[in-house]
Image (tube, rainbow, N blue to C red):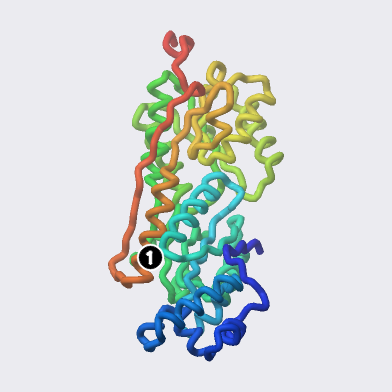
Amino acid sequence: MNIKPNLNFVKGISIKDIAQEAGVSPTTVSFVLNGKGKEKRISEQVSKRILKIAGKLKYKPNQLARGLRTGKTKTIGLIVEDIANSFFANVAKVVEDEADKFGYKVLFGSTEDNEEKAKGLLEVLRYRQVDGYIITPTLNLDKEIVSLQKPVVLMDRYFPNIADSHYVVVDNFQGAYVAVSHLVEQGYKKIGIITTTSSQIQMQQRLEGFVDALKKHGLPAGKNVIKRLPFDLDRAGFIQEITQYLQANKDLDALFFATNYLGICGIESIRAIGLHIGTDIGMVSFDDHDIFRLHSPSITCVAQPVEEIGRRLIHLLIAELEHSSTTPQQVVLSLELRKRESSMQHMSHVNA
């Protein structure tokens, strides 16, 4: 279980230590540190002395103890699918930075799309008494999320059966549709998709967008152009499966990868069988990645607005924490098709 706290507790320094050095009671110190000095009629001189001593001793409050007193720990739980994935890592960074502006710290962990691991993370975050949650849910986590009784904002995916949930997602269907339409416009006629066996809504929407685009343009959309891979395969497993699919379907002239990690494995698979991206086979991936920008040829992708996703997540959650809005806020963001060399038009397609 990979919970990473952004709290640096300094052991051995307590309110009693500050009170002893300041020559006041621990209660007085507590009032001052909690911003209640004026309310409790503690003189400005005494308040300044307490704050100066607290700073000198590098005192950090015990968030759990504070939570018992105030009902708030000023912490947020962030659960993502895989913190090593560039998309989730980048969103987590934005969430962390934005939360800090509101005085919140972030605890986060990865589910690896494992339901039991996700439940374990929720238990840990409950114990840490986080004030609210941002969750990339696993498939059957809906009941646990409903039972949290704390503000929750879902990211990347949602549960259609939870009508009142708050979420921030992208238009997965339209993103896939635009990507495939772009390949068609560039002259590609036999386009395959590499996706996962996941029945989560975002993956289903990407597949539906792919199929709909092919049908709209009168191109084959049967089972042989769809390759589903188990999510829990390792890198070597993905590469092997994609390689075998390409060898068995040599008439494909372009591929759409439903995630960036599949796209990265696809680059290796294409190279392994001696094909050249952009000349022998076109390629577009869902989600951008530094590798796609730096690879030669560069890889066309459907890019998610990472910074906007992170900002929206925090602002929605803070609004819930501070104002308890009851109206579900369901944000669907647009994507950007970043056209690069891997899907450029070629004479072989133009003359076909």
Residue 23 sits above or below residue 291 on the image: below
Name the residue located 56 percent from the left edge and 55 percent from the top edge: 81
Name the residue located 47 percent from the left edge and 55 percent from the top edge: 97
Q: Which residue is mark 1?
A: 318
Q: Position of residue 139 (x, y in %)?
A: 52, 60
Q: Dividing the picture into quarters, in which one does residue 294 lie?
A: top right
Extreme residue in the left direction: 327
Residue 309 placement, left or right of 278 = left
Residue 169 placement, left or right of 199 = left
* Badge 1 amino acid: Ile
Q: Tag 1's secondary structure?
A: helix
> Which is more toward the observer, 63 or 243?
63
Name the residue located 57 percent from the left edge and 63 percent from the top edge: 6
Residue 318 sits above or below residue 285 on the image: below
Name the residue located 55 percent from the left edge and 78 percent from the top edge: 64
In this orientation, does residue 189 appear? yes
Residue 49 sits above or below residue 25 on the image: above
Q: Dividing the picture into quarters, in which one does residue 26 lie?
A: bottom right
Q: Position of residue 147 (x, y in %)?
A: 46, 75
Quadrant including the C terminus: top left
Extreme residue in the front direction: 45
Q: Residues within 10 Å of mark 1 (few under 14, many from 20)?
A: some
Residue 314 placement, left or right of 87 = left
Q: Position of residue 194 (x, y in %)?
A: 55, 37
Quadrant including the N terminus: bottom right
> Which is more toward the observer, 192 or 6?
6
> Which is more toward the observer, 82 or 163?
82
In this orientation, does residue 71 appear? no
Number of numbered discs:
1
Q: Position of residue 145 (x, y in %)?
A: 47, 69
